[in-house]
Amino acid sequence: MAESDRRLVQTAVIGSAASGMGIVLPQEADELRRLRRRHPTYTYWCGTQLGGCGNKLSDRLYVDKVCHFAHAPNASCHRKANGANSADHLFIKQDLALWARRSGVDARAVLRDLGSGPGDAVDLRVRDSRQRVRFQFRRLTHPEWRSAREELERDAASLDWVFGPGSAHPETMEEMYETFGYVLRFRFETQGVARRIRIRAEEARRSTDWVPLDACAMTPEGLRVPGVERRRRASPRPGVGTSTGSPVNLPVARTLRGGTAPAQASDVPGREPSAVAPDPKSTTGADRRAGRRTSPLVRKVQRLVDEVNVLVAAADAEVRTKAERMDREAAAWIERYGRLTSSDFWSGKATKVAGHGDALAGRLEKLSRQLK
Ligand SMILES: [Zn+2]
């Protein structure tokens, strides 16, 4: 029985011990049965990228308690993190790579072992512009953070920190508020057998809404989260961060159209077209299609609508009606998204619209899964 496996292992990697494809096992028996039916060839491993022993795991199905992964009875494993959040670094690594590609940014996401395992931190490195974004999972003391910052800033044109739950020391947060006026945070939400990151900016008294990665953008000044104004109050490192010493006033969530090098775009701050904040004049169908081409979230919704429309052809009338309703909702949402202006990103309106799009994408994904 499960006695040999005292801790419940809830995550694994798929395919091989060295795989980077994480999975969270569904806790409900019905969901696990569905997963087995859908992916009968999946093999699960206590992956090395999870800090695991590299042994094979089996998926244990229970109806009276939560399902979980289990080692073979004689396996010896010293993996430290086994909970549902223990593969989050793998999910964000994959999502960052996709997000960068969709945004036309040449970047690489790498896992950083800071002493307790491969999930301590994930760094996004933008190649040409030498920009860095650090997603910090493991808690850092203030001196540790300072030395990590020095290391990362050494050859970086911009550096953003995004902190996971409990990973920032209060003194570090103080210093972030002092320098930027806010702290970027992340958390994860479980979606089926994966987990997806949500990011927000926290100021001393208020926070923006949690948004998906697709609502954020890489700009010449660094990572932009909707509803946030970058305010670098002091420049502790010359040549790092924004080039102006005074507060900058830039539309947020700007990014570059595919293929443009970030360094070139910084010549005209505040004037670049946006991947997320569409052109204010985008009211024609053609412009909306252009918006669809540049916004990963819009493209995702459109792709899912197309997918559902194909799959639903063979479904019964009730499901077809549901799909039609979602199709109309998606069309209205895309139009609404296309009408957003830069000022909407300041007011937080864009965050709400992006949140709606994200929720809609989630429902479309669910319907698509049901139809498959
Ligand atoms: Zn193991």
Image: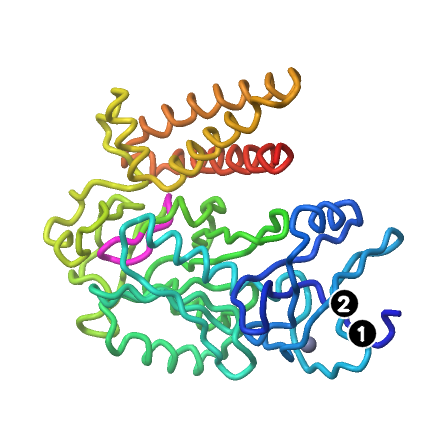
As drawn, the label of residue 67 is: none
Left or right? Give the position of 293 relative to 270. right
- Amino acid type, label 1: Asp
Q: In this picture, is 282 found above or below 74?
A: above
Left or right? Give the position of 5 relative to 152. right
Residue that extends furthest to the front in the rendered view of this protein: 41
Residue depicted at 71% across the width and 47% down the height: 37
Left or right? Give the position of 144 relative to 129. right
At label 2, counting other C-alpha atoms closer than 10 Å, the crowd grade (few under 14, some 14-19, many 20 or more) is some
Count the marks: 2
Q: In this picture, is 367 found above or below 74?
A: above
Q: What element carries label 2?
A: loop
Q: In this picture, is 355 found above or below 161?
A: above
Assess whether residue 226 is covered by the magenta stretch.
Answer: yes
For disc 2, the marked residue is 8
Dividing the picture into quarters, in which one does residue 75 lie?
Answer: bottom right
Screen quadrant of the N terminus: bottom right
Residue depicted at 52% across the width and 66% down the height: 20
Q: Nearer the viewer, residue 226 or 361?
A: 361
Q: In this picture, is 359 found above or below 103?
A: above
For disc 1, the marked residue is 5
Residue depicted at 29% across the width and 28% down the height: 289
* Residue 133 screen position, x and y as percent: 36, 64
Mark pair 1, 2: CA separation: 7 Å
- Which contiguous range is marked in magenta? 218-227
